[in-house]
């Protein structure tokens, strides 16, 4: 079994055991990867990022609030 398959199996097990934690994990990974992708393309990752859904839902990653407030 390769590393990708091992990761997928472990994640699916987490989904079964604790869906909230699995959602937090995958969301954090998605946001982190998106920010890194923007940085590597020379974009300002400190501003609001919009991922167009191309006929599906759009996703917005809000910029960090100046005083750390949660929106």
Image (tube, rainbow, N blue to C red):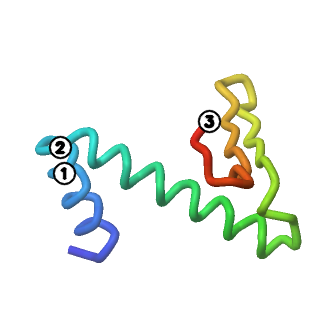
Please tell me which residue lies in front, 65 or 39: 65
Q: Please rate how many residues cluster around mark 2, counting C-alpha atoms within 10 Å: few if below 14, some from 14 to 19, many from 20.
A: few
Q: Which mark is residue 18?
A: 2
Residue 2 is situated, as x and y percent measured from the top left of the image, at 27, 76
Question: What residue did someone put label 1 on?
Answer: 14
Helix, strand or loop at label 1? It is helix
Decide if residue 43 is on the left or right side of residue 61.
right
Residue pictured at 58% horizontal, 55% vertical:
31
**Residue farthest to the front?**
67
Q: Are marks 1 and 2 in contact (CB under 8 Å)?
A: yes
For marks 2 and 3, the one nearer the N-term is 2
Position of the C terminus, as image quadrant, is top right
Report which quarter residue 17 is drawn in.
top left
Q: Nearer the viewer, mark 1 or mark 2?
A: 2
Residue pictured at 36% horizontal, 43% vertical:
23
Q: Please rate how many residues cluster around mark 1, counting C-alpha atoms within 10 Å: few if below 14, some from 14 to 19, many from 20.
A: some
């Amino acid at each position: 079994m390769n590393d990708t398959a091992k990761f997928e199996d472990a994640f699916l097990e987490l989904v079964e055991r604790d869906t909230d934690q699995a959602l937090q994990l995958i969301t954090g990974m998605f946001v982190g990867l998106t920010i890194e992708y923007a940085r590597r393309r020379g974009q300002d990752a400190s501003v609001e990022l919009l991922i167009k859904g191309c006929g599906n839902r759009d996703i917005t990653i809000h910029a960090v609030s100046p005083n750390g407030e949660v929106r």
